[in-house]
Image: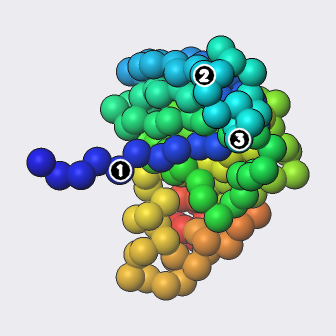
Amino acid sequence: MPTKISPCLWFDHQAEDAARFYTAIFKDSKIIAISRYPEAGQEIHGKAAGSVMTVAFELNGQTFTALNGGPIFKFNEAVSFQIECATQKEVDYYWERLSEGGDPQAQQCGWLKDQFGLSWQIVPKVLSELLNDPDTAKSQRAFQAMMKMRKLDIEGLQRAFAG
């Protein structure tokens, strides 16, 4: 049996809120389990007994753990989650839902930060085809168009590609 890799997301105290936010956006998603801090070890973890420690959840078959670990660590752009979208309607849906309450200044080239500071890439499936086309003039035009966009626009990328 292959080893399963599952991301663990470190939050200050918003693990349950984040898991509920994400599972409300992605179809075929659910909260699997919520564990709570015990009294034991309180001198180390500093969390109130009974407060949420971890939330195990699933988004489209991918398992995640959200941990309330305190304010020590913050998300940054070095790690992001990429959502490949088949249509503009799908791009629009994920962009609108995930960017709600997020930082508008962090929106560029299909990237956004959600209200918890986690980075996402909302990418149309066709983008890879456009950027990897053997005709470098076409692919460069698509790349230049992408660089000017916040939310990616499939029609705009295709127009730039076509010239």
Along the line of sight, the residue nearer the viewer: 44 or 136 = 44
Residue 15 vertical position relative to residue 6 in the rendered view, above or below: above
Residue 16 picture quarter: top right
Taking 18 as reference, is 69 above or below it?
below
Number of numbered tags placed on the structure image: 3
In this image, 6 relative to 150: left or right? left
Question: How crowded is the residue under tag 2: few (<14 C-alpha within 10 Å), some, or many (20+)?
Answer: some
**2 vs 1, front mark:** 2
Element at label 3 = helix
Viewer-side label of 3, 1: 3
Task: Tell me if 161 is positioned left or right of 151 in this view.
Answer: left
Q: Which mark is on residue 54?
A: none
The residue nearer to you, when weighing 75 against 95, is 75
Residue 123 in the image, given as x and y percentages of width and height: 53, 51
Q: Label 1: which residue?
A: 5
Between the residue at mark 2 and the residue at mark 1, the CA separation in whole angstroms equals 27 Å
Q: Neighbour class for label 3 at 10 Å: few (<14), some, many (≥20)?
A: few
143 horizontally vs 104: left or right: left
Q: Report the amino acid beneath label 3.
A: Ile
Question: Mark 3 highlights which residue?
Answer: 44
Q: Earlier in the sequence, mark 3 or mark 2?
A: 2
The residue that disc 2 covers is: 38
Q: Is residue 25 visible?
A: no
